[in-house]
Image (cartoon, rainbow, N blue to C red):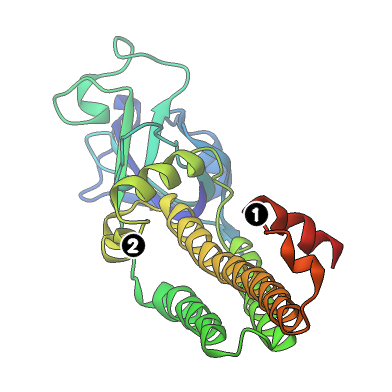
Amino acid sequence: MDYEMDVFFIEHWTDPRLKHNESSFIIFSDKTQLDRLWTPDIYFANSKTAQLNFIMVPNMNVRVWPNGRIRLGTRCHGAIYRERVLGDGRPGFIGQRYSTYGFNCEQYSSRILFGDLLRICLLVKFSLQRSIQYSLLQTYFPTTFIVIISWISFWIDPASVPGRIGLALTTLLTLSTQAIAIQFQLPPVGYPKVMRLMKWCSVNYFGFEALWNFGSFDLTQIGEAQDVWFGICLTFLFASLVEFATVNMYMRWASQLMDFDENLQQSEKLNDPSILTPLMPQDFPKILSNR
């Protein structure tokens, strides 16, 4: 998963060569003077692209204290990628790593990077809590109503083939269109979906627990939960079509058997010699195929 962020990055270090006799710190932001200043080679370890902001002038500011302590503040923009943790791990944060490129712990003073600890890479964690209201209104409620509408076909006369088929196909196409529209708004995380679908279908009662525990998912599991939900809804719609096809098939068989029984009774009344030969159960498929 990728995300973009603007960072106000502030660095502190000490350069004895810049000691001065002023009573307070000196501020300057001239690019010519900044180019002559030594700065640590800090970079974003997990960034795809990063750049300084240049709105009218470079967004940089330097303060130099009398003892040679320097504070450099910059504003930069970067596209950061979040590392995916496979398996059962569910990290609840997204992180930004800052590291040094050309130096190690022995070459840097231990107090420059992080207090009294030796660190050449710092990790900043941002804890996020997503809101479920948007997903409820845009995804779960509409799809639930579509599935309920498809159940109306159970009360329609099974002999009304156009009505039941039209209602089932309309709801199926509507749900498919909505699923495709939702997919364009989600990150493409396809590798764990099949395993999670099988796990949720066997443990969490066909995945319905995903709706109630939705707040505990990390960001990449948003697409997974909605994929499972759409899969369940499509299963219900497809099951309604299978139910109608099964009922219609048995109705046709029952109608053919009733017609055959009626013809048989008429033959008995007319003393038809053909009825003298008893019929066996294995003769019914042949009779039905000849009709």
Q: Callout 1 environment at 10 Å: few (<14), some (14 to 19), or many (20+)?
A: few
> Residue 112, how many percent across, how many down?
26, 28
Residue shown at 27%/49% (left/top)?
25
> Residue 104, how many percent across, how many down?
36, 13
Q: Earlier in the sequence, mark 1 or mark 2?
A: 2
Judge left or right: residue 232 versus residue 206. Answer: right
Helix, strand or loop under label 1: loop
Residue at image mark 1: 280
Residue shown at 33%/70% (left/top)?
131
Q: Give 6 or 288, whichever is nearer the viewer.
A: 288
Task: Give the residue type that dot 2 points to.
Answer: Phe
Q: Give 226 or 284, whichever is nearer the viewer.
A: 284
Judge left or right: residue 221 versus residue 19. Answer: right
Q: Give 275 or 205, whichever is nearer the viewer.
A: 275
Q: Give 8 or 146, whichever is nearer the viewer.
A: 146
Above or below, 286 against 68 in this view is below
Residue at image mark 2: 208
Judge left or right: residue 284 versus residue 57. Answer: right
> Residue 218, how many percent across, how many down?
35, 51
Say if residue 115 shows up in the picture: yes
- What is the number of callouts on the image? 2
Quadrant of residue 245 within the rendered picture: bottom right
